[in-house]
Amino acid sequence: MLFCIPLYVPNQLVYGGNDLSKSALVIGGGIAGIQASLDLADRGIHVYLVEKDPTIGGVMCRLDKTFPTNDCSACILSPKMADCNGHPNIDVLTYHEVLKVDGEAGDFKVTVLKKARYVNPKECTGCGDCIAKCPVKNIPDKYEFGLVNRKAIYIPHAQAVPRVAVIDKTQCMKLNKDKCGNCAKVCGKGAIHYDDKDEEIVLEVGSIIAAPGFKVWDASIATEYGYGRYKNVVTAIEYERMMCASGPDKGHITIPYFKVDSSTKEHPTKVAYIQCCGSRSEKKGWKKYCSSVCCMYATKQAMITKEHGDLQEDIFFMDIRSYGKEFEAYINRGEKEYGIRMHRGARVSNIEEDPVTKALTINYTDDENNGVSETFDIVVLSIGLAPPEGAQEFADTLGIELNKYGFCKTSVFKPLETTRPGIFVTGAFAAPKDIPTSVAEACGSSAKAGAWIVRKDFQPCAPKQYPAEKDVIGKEPRIGVWVCHCGINIGSVVNVPEVAEYAKTLPHVIVSSQSQYACAQDCLESISKAITEYDLNRVVVASCTPRTHEPLFREACRDGGLNKYLFNMANIRDQCSWIHMHQPEAATAKAKDLLRMSIAKAALLEPLVGSEIPVTNAAAVIGGGITGMNAALDIAAQGFPVHLVEKDTELGGYARNFNFSEDGKPVKEYLKELIAKVEKCPLISVHTGVTVKDIPGFVGNFTLRLSDGKDYPVGGVLFAVGAKPYKPTEYGYGTDSKVMTQIEAEEKIEAKQFNAQNVVFVQCVGSRNDDVHYCSRVCCASSLRNAIKIKMANPMANVTIIHKDIRTYGFREELYQMASSLGVRFLRYPADKGLPKYDGKTVKAFDCTLGDCLEIPVDALILATGIAPDRENKENLAKMVKVPISKDGFYFEAHQKLRPVDFATEGVYVAGAAHWPKFMDECIAQASGAASRMLTVISKDKLISEGIVAGVNEALCDGCGVCVGCCDYNAVNLVKQDDGSFKSQVNPGLCKGCGCCVASCPSGALEQRGFRNKQIIAEIDACLDYPVGGE
Amino acid sequence: MADFEPRIVTFCCNWCSYAGADGAGVARLQMPTNFRIIRTMCSARVDPEFILRAFSKGADGVMVLGCHPGDCHYIGGNYRARRRIALLRLVLEQYGFDPKRLKLEWVSASEGEKFQKTVNEFVDTIKALGPTPLKKEEA
């Protein structure tokens, strides 16, 4: 048995003993660390998750909403936090810090400091009685970024995991002056222990993942913006808390100065956002790089602020960098639908404050080049991302190197590896990045880290044990109801207390309560407890959508000893409060109806048991480019066979066309080595020159059917089919020898055959236009790379880049700075007026900065052509496994934020340019991410199938056989009975649970478990037998 | 009649249209409150009996929303739903019940906007048709 329970015995207890398989260590409990831990744990590897703060959740759990879906951050993260905390393979060590890393990859000995909490987490119930009685106030609350104060004993926040108090030893009167002692006096559980001591423990681990995240840039460095002096200038992260329902103002955005002097108005009518605060500048204390996420989060904040009330909002920026999936559409929506005023090319130089009214004035130039002076109530500084606090000490402790910006040093070809073998990096510690990229990388680093642990004698951890399920058959339904406020997502529209009260009047409802976040750990625990306490045999939660949260609540039911199919959900957020925001009364009535329908069905639910499905321990990877090959290697590294399918006759994909070098190494050379590695790997079967005919089957049991007539059983499928370059029709491409694409230019430059004097680059050819709405992400950087090479070879060349925005996010900003310093000219043309004109000799373009049309002579016109989705190829494959395609023609993942490489269809994954245009390092990281997700499935011997399948009541079946023809999966058959008659029979292993046969049965003999006729009819009746709103 | 608020029962399949309805929520697309969604795994699970039940209980309209043809999560469930509903419409018409009160539409997981449009149009249709005759008889 591998799973070992850590016992905190003083004086260095060593655990993770030698005869056991090694554990993994994840440092940092933000979204990246959480995801990495979950993937490792689901792979059967034991994980220590070390977090220096008293709670996991990192920055993400303090955000209000997330772009580009405007999902509530707490709602989508809480399930993962709860999952982490309850996972039998994860030891969450909060308030711990890594002190020393000895040993080497595969055999690290890590010394960890367990900081004294002075509260025993096993005894603390998180009731908060101690906090109420603590006399030490006025300590700036770090969690709220100092917006409010906390006590000396505190629980970090309402959704904290674990939800346990902690004493701030620097502030506590008892610990410092031996006075007070109130908290110990009021604690009914005796959980307070003033004699608690810091302890050192040693963990033996095979590999380490560093995910310490980032810190926000210190805005007081930007003295020109008056942060700290002007009350109404706030940082974006503070504003995030101001907007958030769980924030200090409960989501009511007020003008900060209003609080100190109520002579001014309370709610803002004008808010400005200043971009690149702390980023993209040579100024002292500022960062040269682009922080990658600020354009998007500022737009999000502006959109969400609009939802709080009608007001004017202005965003001042140099370039808008909406390079990610669906980002461009999001920005357009902000501008066009929400009416956010976008001021392009506007770096705000300073802010002035009116000494009396505290209103803030910004001077800027408008699109017509007029000087404008405008006053705002609040100015939000879009501060950048900096390396985490103490990054250098942390790096020294781990024995890894940092890059020149102070982030973890990685390389393009090894984006997840630090400079020390066996230690991997994920999240914003490697570079500023958004949540989905962090999540994909987190999965990726767990694939890498896992490979050091999964060796020949590896024994996966035993699965989770649940309490015995209570017998509910034949018992009167006893239903517990929880109605969720979801911060203000539901509560600001639907009258939640009224709905919760209403539920009490409905049949079989024993208990009904409301919760700020039903998905938070404390509520989940109360659901589990209530099952015993009130002897509940059904649970109903009215909150968000079952598509994301049903598994979490089902798990809470199982923890409480209830079969998970005795749970039902009412969707009163996505399908009610969010779509009826301006109709609170009607929305409340609808929420009551939906809850009543859900309860009516719940009363008729039965316990179901899924059957065991064997899993084929092999993977299929479709696409033999850089993404596909890297994923195949990562899967094979953990001992599983891979079928790598490439439709071309050789491996390499589109990267074969690349001529440039990364990290001083030509891509072609890297590719050669990669192909050699793949071909040498005994576990990888390469199938080139063949296409995929079909992929019948389901999770754990697919058949990969190839065009050469061969079939291979596999447990999961990864689509790494890439995209294809946009083939330009613009500018007489193909007929005019002066006009070429980036790749063609690059080839000439590398061959030293490029000698044009007047060079013009045109950006966004085949991107960001009326047909292709998205940004192709990589073209700006490749134009700059080529422009730099041209200038280096011939400093006298006239190089002009005609662009809408330059999108060199992250450290790629370096290219922009270098090109500028080499004298490359940049001409910004209007984003909405079509491409500049070219007559064979000159390019005519409107220069937004000059406000005039320029004519530029051309010897070489280089088109920054975008990336086309290759929709047809994607659709063919998509149909085989039933996965969706986004409106832009790329694969549509299960969840844009937190499941970036999964599909909603289990066992099918996506990575690389098939998901969205991206750079090589991003493809490599995502490939590892998809490999990790694949490993969580194919490493298992068996899966438990869904219990929702069809069944036959033989007493009613008269053997007509209508159902047999109905089933597309051959799951229904007629079986001859002893008396010569026929009865229908369902094979639960083949049944997918669609219920098609059930609806076809003329005698009512077929039933779909979980969706029985009587259950659905109960919903219909509950809807219509009552007046709207049930009153 | 001006303040007639129709009651509409909507069946959504788990994989496409229910996800599309969620997508409408995520995008905060606003629409009337007149409909109540019942989730089934596939549009083919929607037994004509359910639709008749809803009408007999006084629903002014019923929508069945499924995956686009060819995109069904379960191979061809939506084709079967289409056939059943086509037939049911004929039956409704024969009994003097306006088949316009029953709508079948395809909404994919990424089509929040289409979901909104479908709801808006159907609410308008039903408002134009007025309250269900079955309800009037009862009263």
Image: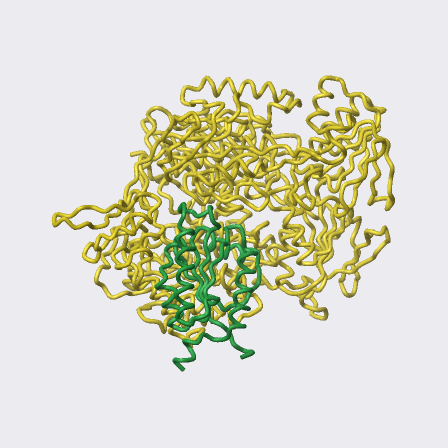
**Along the line of sight, which residue is nearer the eye, A501 or A596?**
A596
Q: Residue at x 52, y 20 (%)?
A: A675
Q: Residue at x 79, y 62 (%)?
A: A355
Instruction: From the rendered image, report the letter of the chain displayed in yellow.
Output: A
x%, y% of residue A785? Answer: 71, 28
x%, y% of residue A732? Answer: 76, 32
Residue A440 in sight here: yes
Q: Is residue A584 left or right of residue B60?
A: right
Q: Is residue A39 above or below residue B45?
A: above
Looking at the rendered image, the quarter that the N terminus of chain A falls into is top left
Q: Is residue A210 left or right of residue A384?
A: left
**Along the line of sight, which residue is nearer the eye, A586 or A193?**
A586
Residue A1010 in sight here: no
Q: Is residue A339 left or right of residue A644?
A: right
> Going by the picture, which residue comes out furthest to the front?
B94
Looking at the rendered image, the quarter that the C terminus of chain A falls into is bottom left
* Count of all numbered marks drawn on residues in the image: 0
User: For chain B, what colour was chosen?
Assistant: green
x%, y% of residue A935? Answer: 41, 34
